[in-house]
Amino acid sequence: MKKSITWAIAHTLHWAALYAAFYMKLEGAQNLLVFLVLLLACASPMLLMDAAIQKAAADAPRSAAISALNWFQAWATLCLFAWHGWFVCAVAQAVSMFFLAGHLAKASDARKAEPCKGVK
């Protein structure tokens, strides 16, 4: 329950920042969004480290609905950056999406490779 509440709050704030940044033209929201996207682009290669993959594999996989909403949000962010001419940020968003996709694929493979616990 705590995870879903945290997820809902984080994504609601992200959508609010997107709306404020691009439709209300608030500079503070634009700067915050650019900072977050550039930070994610710089930090996302660490998602492919073995420790990050093993930690993600130990957790239960995301539900299909949450996964679909996450990807929808990522693509919407990418499209908004490209539509409004912020091409450097669009490339940064694409880089972070690329590394996240690799991380999720490797975590899924690691989950499948693990033997079932409790079964001998």
Image: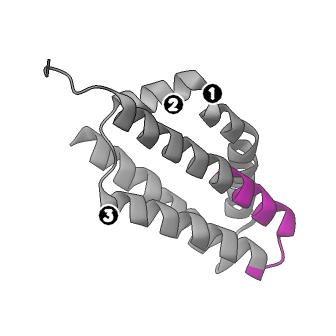
Would residue 13 appear left or right of 40 to someone viewing this image?
Answer: left
Amino acid at dot 2? Ile
From the viewer's perspective, tell me whether residue 43 is left or right of residue 70: right
- Read off the residue under disc 3: 65
Q: Secondary structure at mark 3?
A: helix
Q: State the image coordinates of residue 98 (x, y, percent, origin top left).
A: 67, 53
Residue drawn at (70%, 53%) of the image? 37
Mark 2, Cα crowd under 10 Å, few <14 / some 14-19 / many 20+, is many
Pointer 1 with pointer 3, Cβ within 8 A: no
Instruction: Residue under label 2, please give it.
Output: 53
Specify whether 120 is left or right of 35. Answer: left
Q: Is residue 31 magenta?
A: no
How far is the residue under mark 3 from the one under mark 2?
22 Å
Asked whether disc 3 touches disc 2, contact meaning CB atoms under 8 Å apart, the reply is: no
Image quadrant of residue 43?
top right
Residue at 48% in and 58% down: 13
Residue 25 visible at all: no
